[in-house]
Image (tube, grey):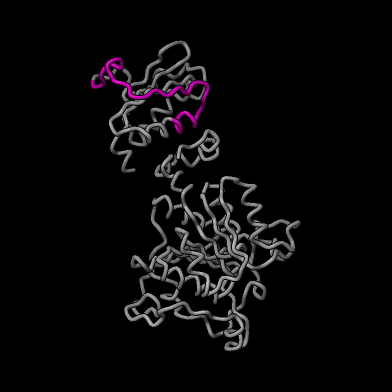
Amino acid sequence: MKLTEEQILRYSRQIILPGVGGRGQKKLAEAKVFIMGAGGLGSPAALYLAAAGVGTIGLADSDRVELHNLQRQILHKTSDVGRLKVESGKTTIESLNPEVKVEIYPQRITSENIREVIRKYDLCLDGSDNFPTRFLLNDACFFEKKTLISGAILRFHGQLSTFKPHIGGHCYRCLFPAPPREHVPNCQEAGVLGAIAGIIGVFQANEALKEILGIGESMVGRFLDINTLDLSIHVFEVRKNPDCPLCGNHPVIRDLVQYSQTCIAEQAGNIQCGAV
Amino acid sequence: METATGVHLEHSVPRQNTVEQPDAKEIRVDQELNLKWKVCPYTFVESMLALEEMEIGQVLRVIVDYAPSACDVPKSLTKEGYEVLDVSKINDTDWAILVRNTVFQENR
């Protein structure tokens, strides 16, 4: 693939970067990134990946745009209210960069279809808003040996990490072996400041670009926690948990587990939510 | 080097007529890139893109007519690990930059 005059113009400010160049730009054009959720995290992540020239973006979300989404889900506009988020997202991404191929998954992603969906992608970004999906994506990425860039937000807080259990890193279950049984408030109950979705979503995009380009230090083995109120940022070292039920020395999870939102809610007496 | 007039250019043109450098006329050029009418950063970007497509050891001759590029392109290429062999003003408006593709660049 030879870069066109227009591509040179469009991407010039990153082509000149050390470690990018024409070769890096071609890597980006050939890259396929799957984003779970076209919401608070998926929106900024998708926009920056598209702007950078990532060739294929898979976008999965079964929700429709609602007015209360617009405070943070910047893929969607007021006129998109009522549209499927993946369709609205596809329109926005393509208007930003028509070179990007956007593949949309408006169907519910379940244990039945997730492995097949993510198989064709090079890496996955988690922008999901509930624990069942978060664990499902983590497990599916482990079984399919896909790198997973995980982000989560609530109120004024954000978290970020990269999971590569297939090459020795930790996974989500190393940190949280199972969905919480106690009540965890979701964004609807606890609220979230839109800008934190931007911060973590853009961090995820940045990590994805680094993974594709093969530059810098990834977040494998590290976990970032940010409190935007006092702007304190902590990065912890994380090791693979030998007792992890999924990727540990004696795994008990051999296949995908489909947690149900209502099931957890019944157990815990309330609805759970991971992020967004 | 902030003006396009080339007034302050002479002192900033790197390694012209240094002892180690062979005479520019003796260097075999494998490819030529005409970047007249182009400005920074595209002169650098297009030089780098051309080098990436070339074999290690091959020499690219870049022609620019934008004075800042005659200074900045060699500087940026050197920083990227390419070997700038010569920079010469070849007529009233143009500069020729000779640069060799290197192994270092391959391993970036």
Q: Is residue A237 magenta?
A: no
| Vertical side of A212 occupied by A180: above or below | below
Name the residue: 55% across, 73% down.
Answer: A110
The residue segment tinted magenta is B20-46
B26 vs B84: above or below: above
Q: Is residue B73 above or below residue A100?
A: above
Q: Quadrant of residue A202?
A: bottom right
x then y, percent, for residue A191: 65, 71
Residue placed furthest toward the top: B92
Q: How many marks?
A: 0
Q: Which quadrant would the C terminus of chain A be assigned to in this image?
A: bottom right
Q: Picture coordinates of residue A86 (x, y %)? A: 63, 60
Front residue of this view, candidates B34 and B88: B34
- Where does the image place residue A107, in percent across and percent down from the top left? 61, 68
At x 42% / y 61%, what residue is drawn? A219
Identified at 43% across, 52% down, the residue is A212
Residue A101 appears left or right of A216? right
A84 and A37: which one is in front? Answer: A84
Question: Looking at the image, which residue is at 53% across and 33% down?
Answer: A5
- What is the quadrant of the N terminus of chain A in the image? top left
Residue lying at the far right in this picture: please name it. Answer: A79
**Residue B24 falls inside the magenta stretch:** yes
Q: Position of residue A179 (x, y in %)?
A: 51, 80
